[in-house]
Image (cartoon, rainbow, N blue to C red):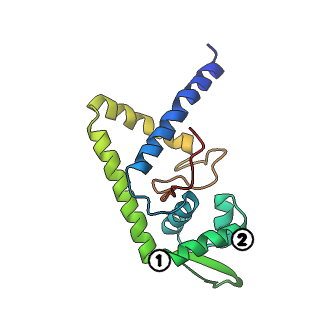
Amino acid sequence: MTADDGIAELAHRLRPLVFRLYYVVRRETPQYQLTLTQGSVLAALVLDGPQRMSALAEREGVRTPSMTDVVGRLERLGLVRRGPDPTDGRAVIASATEEGRRLIDELVRAREEFLRARLARLDDADRAAITAALPAFERLAGVGGTPAPDQAATTDAITNAGDDANEEETDH
């Protein structure tokens, strides 16, 4: 077996596990009827602070008019507010409201509690193996250092904070 074969096998085994863990955490914790994009945008505004529509659009890999629609839906839900950019009156800044921050905080707490309960059921050796693997997973995801080559947005515990039943997963 060559190194490339070993990497291909690792990717083949890792992909469904990562997806399954992600899916189980989402399924077993509150969703709040947010789409993946809405949750990601709200999480970005909570985590990174107010941002221009154009910056949010770039971060999510969509066009600015599409981001304006996403932020408009979040604004109607009372999770985000829009205002003029103080440095450029033509631009709009979006920011999370207190309700938006509370929602993300609650979601993070629920998801971390779910993971704590699952981790508590593992034996010490399994938890130690997961702990030892975390730095490699962080590098793989591009967290806390040089971003992974295909990383479009900051990876964080609250990325994809919300989901919508109509938004199907495609990576099975």
Badges 1 and 2: C-beta atoms under 8 Å apart? no
Crowd around label 2: few <14 · some 14–19 · many ≥20 (10 Å): few
Query: Residue sitting at 30 percent across and 28 percent down?
Result: 125
Badge 1 amino acid: Thr
Badge 2 amino acid: Pro
| Residue 170 x %, y % | 60, 44
In the rendered view of the protein, which quadrant contains the N terminus? top right
In the rendered view of the protein, which quadrant contains the C terminus? top right
| Label 1 to label 2: alpha-carbon separation | 22 Å
The residue singled out by tag 1 in the image is 97
| Residue 98 x %, y % | 42, 76
Q: Residue furthest top?
A: 1
> Is 73 in front, or is 148?
73
Query: Residue sitting at 42 percent across and 75 percent down?
Result: 99
Lower sequence index among marks 1 and 2? 2
Q: Residue furthest front?
A: 166
Query: Residue sitting at 48 percent across and 74 percent down?
Result: 79
The residue singled out by tag 2 in the image is 65
Left or right, 45 with reference to 55? left
Res 5 → quadrant? top right
Q: Secondary structure at mark 2?
A: helix
* In the image, residue 131 above or below residue 125: below
Q: Secondary structure at mark 1?
A: loop
Left or right, 83 with reference to 62? left
| Residue 48 x %, y % | 53, 66
Kindly report which numbered mark, 1 or 2, lies closer to the viewer in this rendering: 2
* In the image, residue 109 above or below residue 2: below
* In the image, residue 16 above or below residue 114: above
